[in-house]
Image (spheres, grey):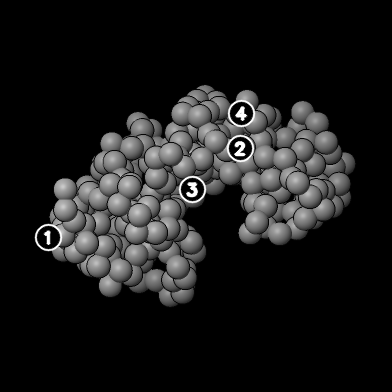
Amino acid sequence: MVDPSGYLPRVVGASASLLADAVGHYVFVSSVSVYEPPLAPGFDETASVVELEDPATESIAEAYGGLKAFCERTVEGIFPGRAAHVRAGLIVGPHDPTDRFTYWPVRAARGGEILAPGDPDRQWQFVDARDLGAWLVRLAEQRTAGVFNATGPLPATTAGEVLEICLRVAAVDGRLTWVDDAFLVEHEVGAWMELPLWIPEGDDFAHMQEADASRALAAGLVFRPVEATVRDTLAWAAARTEPQADGVGLTPEHEAKLLAAWHGRTT
């Protein structure tokens, strides 16, 4: 049994209870958002998780991480020793409705001057949905139990490497202008959503993309090359019929204003 869409403990508990005597193993897709901030670099599965202030809440937008952690405990209580809890990082690739990774290949394809956020040497973590999905099936088939941080790629990839790959795949005349955290924070640019994958240094979640995924790797999780994910995502985006996500990525107008302000600053 693979549960890819459990958000509410009440609902997850009902489905798990119904299947408890008919299913030998339960794979629950959780999230790295379960971890209690501030996050330490290289955090592993033993790090503290969020405890809900109101255990009865069902507000996914406000209590996502805590609800996912509660769902994990619910599943484990019903399937003790017979469950895998997969704490996925950002899930990316073709047909991603969130556009949180898609923004970068699409932006690269427009060419021109591209606002690149923060430190180019900062690690960016994500997992292609196709790699994650194949691994989830293997966990179920092999009845692998435990808790796993499921994010990559391998080898580790930096922001600079990802954006250079986007430009190379797009094969356009584009150039990156790296704008530091302090400037972006001062100009109230939204982390993670308005500028996908960017989290400023000093934020409680600054190290969210430095998860230790060695347990998942030992359990067989493998990653396709980043270039393949970028290429396939860009091809899907060029022909997409699904609506784009609202509020994700800089608008061209906002990006231009920020770049103008960056170039015009006094030092």
Earlier-in-chain disc, 2 versus 1: 2
Residue 179 location, x and y as percent?
Answer: 25, 50
Of 35 and 87, the residue lying toward us: 35
Q: Name the residue under label 1.
A: 173
Q: Name the residue type under label 3.
A: Leu
Q: Name the residue type under label 4.
A: Ala
* Local SS, label 2: loop
Q: Name the residue under label 3.
A: 90
Tell me the CA gap for discs 2 and 4. Answer: 7 Å
Quarter residue 36 falls in: top right
Earlier-in-chain disc, 4 versus 1: 4
| Residue depth check, mark 2 versus mark 1: number of the one nearer the observer | 2
Q: Are marks 2 and 4 in contact (CB under 8 Å)?
A: yes
User: From the viewer's perspective, is 82 left or right of 102?
Assistant: right
Crowding around mark 3 (Cα neighbors within 10 Å: few <14, some 14 to 19, many 20+) is many
Residue at the image point whose x is 59% and y is 32% from the top: 148
